[in-house]
Amino acid sequence: MTKPRNDETVTMQSVAVAAGVSPMTVSNTFRYPERVQEETRERVLKIASELGYVPNHAAGNLASGQSRVIGAVIPSIKNSSFYNYVRGMQDHVTSQGYQLILKLADTVSQEAAAIRTFVGLRVAGIALVGDEHESDALTLLRKTGTPVVESWVYNDPFDMAVGYSTADATHAMTSLLIETGRQRIGFVGYDGDVSHRYTERVPIFKRCVEHAGLDSHRIVLVDQADGFSAGAKALERLCAIDPEFDAIVCPTDIVAAGVLFECGRRGWKVPDRLAVAGWGDYEIASEITPGITTIQPHSYEMGQRAMTMIVERASGIDHRGVSHDTGFQVLRRESA
Amino acid sequence: MTKPRNDETVTMQSVAVAAGVSPMTVSNTFRYPERVQEETRERVLKIASELGYVPNHAAGNLASGQSRVIGAVIPSIKNSSFYNYVRGMQDHVTSQGYQLILKLADTVSQEAAAIRTFVGLRVAGIALVGDEHESDALTLLRKTGTPVVESWVYNDPFDMAVGYSTADATHAMTSLLIETGRQRIGFVGYDGDVSHRYTERVPIFKRCVEHAGLDSHRIVLVDQADGFSAGAKALERLCAIDPEFDAIVCPTDIVAAGVLFECGRRGWKVPDRLAVAGWGDYEIASEITPGITTIQPHSYEMGQRAMTMIVERASGIDHRGVSHDTGFQVLRRESA
DNA sequence: GCAGAATATTGTAGCGCTACAAAACACGGA
DNA sequence: TCCGTGTTTTGTAGCGCTACAATATTCTGC
């Protein structure tokens, strides 16, 4: 024997006995209701709920080799950044009879640990953010054949991907600033980048600015992309490079809001003295005054697509190597 | 047979064969390393990692009746409100060899669904927020004997609880405003309250204000506690009751920040024209100008304690009925 | 009333892992 | 050499569930 069997444990067996049917009928009632006659099904469900029976997912998973749980790794819940993404995933998955569970991971090694947990749980699929992952974790995923979607990235998927072009978005935003007459544009990068979502923006920015015949040396890095305080730091550092810089491209709206707070303290008028561009369409971007001009990724849709890809894989449709573009929009507000 | 057996599946058995030991030795290597000789252990671990073996948690859970996964239900990830709480849980749990998985649930019925998923997964314990839950879900938890911690609340736990006294905090904040000479204090309640964490504040506020001989009719409700826009709405509604009101107690710092934004638009000086009090010590409270006077719950510690209680339960220490107070602090900043 | 098809239900045989007890081994003292 | 003690390893017997095939039941049409 294994577990010190608790007599009160409600199993499929006990439901079957109480309902006067075989365990298989109980199993079918939950997994394939249409295979069971309505009358029988209702009786089983009634007894099951009276007894407080909840199918043991661990046992079912083991027996069937299938799972209706999908795991998602989220880098941070500090801000609303992933709010719509998670909502999109959750809404879609629930409607398909699946369940979404989340793990937080700040760093690639934490992400690897999260992946290991999900693989240990034998989930139906895993959604990751970004395209920078620990190679051991990837090997594991490849070996176990777990369906994986990378999101917020677009190129060169490990398995499947859904996102938008960071390059295009960087280009669009920089161009906007150039077109509105800014000449001394500063760029704020994030150097603690886990997911490669930020680092690739720098060269695009450079190329874009140089192409317009402008200087591209106003680039600083901050160690936080989701803290307001990074805004003040970035401003300070850009001032050190060029006190007269007239525009700033931030890695997120949070940093942009931090910049606005600091401008307030310094008495700088936005956008007259400084044009401020954010990224992500966080809630604060539309609520703060002046409103922040930003990149709006279609995060809700991204979450949905990610789940669709995983769920469809389970039903045989193979999306291996597929990368889905959910696009983005430049939202023009008062700050730039 | 059950599952169409995939020959490439790496099981404990295949690791055992490759390492020339019995499956039990492999099992022990992972679960009770000290029972296995160092030499053997290393060989097994080496082979396991070469083969890309990850213990099947579903099978282990089934066989042992134990689980090293703890589930937490979080109402929202829209703001930083639960950031430190989740960090506290995560950090602590990891150091104990457990894993934390999250589910989001906005409403009691979503919470119930999340609980069902966790129970189906046979997790080691569940952390909930607040004390308002669906009765079916509670019955289920009671029947299955799953350890449950309610957090952010203090009184009358279903099983275990960790939190602070909302009543004391409301009292402290209201008293602060009264002591600093405010006479026409407005209160913003949240009427979409899932977790009973907000509703109980209203009567305390009333009593407190009346006890000081002041009017207590300046109370409005908003339907969002985590959106900036609620701040503008609240301000408007309080103006309708009394255009001369001179202080406002908000349900969260987010609402308070929304109030500050609206004050900015109206040209009201804070705290001269209006004293603004927040709640929760969200990051924005310290970053915005003026800084928001707020209630700081010790969320990180709360998360830690919640996990301690669950983990200790697994090792036999019974905390049933125990409620742990993690306290709070009033953080005085410029806004009030 | 009956063959044949369609529908509903049920044994059987594990899925991959672990608790427990039993067995094998190592070591020192008599 | 043998015995007792402590350490390390290994069979055995399931945990609760499901795929599949086989059986039982009901429903046609003639």
Image (spheres, coloured by chain):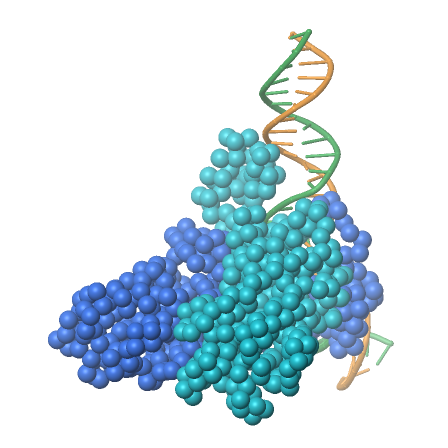
Chain colours: A cyan, B blue, C orange, D green
Q: How far from the left and from the top, in percent, is residue B335?
A: 31, 81
Q: Residue A14: percent from the left, percent from the top? A: 53, 43
For this orientation, the residue located farthest to the bottom is A240
> Which one is in front, B295 or A183?
A183
Q: Is residue A2 visible?
A: no
State which quadrant residue B69 falls in.
bottom right
Question: In this orientation, which residue lies closer to the viewer: B162 or A11?
Answer: B162
Q: Nearer the viewer, residue B38 or B4?
A: B4
Q: Quadrant of the N terminus of chain B?
A: top right
Query: x, y (%) of residue B292?
Result: 35, 80
Query: Looking at the picture, does residue B26 appear above or below residue C5?
Result: below
Q: Splitting the image into 4 quarters, where does residue A288 fall? A: bottom left
Is residue A179 visible from the viewing direction of this image? yes
Q: Is residue A229 left or right of residue A176?
A: left
Q: What is the total number of numbered labels drawn onto the structure image?
A: 0
**Is residue B314 found left or right of A321 in the rendered image?**
left
Using residue B14 as the reference point, say whether residue A93 is left or right of it.
left
In the image, residue B15 sits, relative to residue A8, either above or below, namely below
Q: Position of residue A36 (x, y in %)?
A: 57, 33
- Residue drawn at x 25%, y 83% as measured from the top left: B272
Q: Quadrant of the C terminus of chain B?
A: bottom left
Q: Residue at x 27, y 66 (%)?
A: B236
Q: Is residue B117 left or right of residue B209?
A: right
Residue drawn at 51 percent across, 37 percent down = A44
The single residue placed furthest to the left in the displayed view is B213
At 51% from the left edge and 61% from the top edge, which residue is drawn?
A: A84
Quick one: A83 or B120, which is closer to the camera? A83
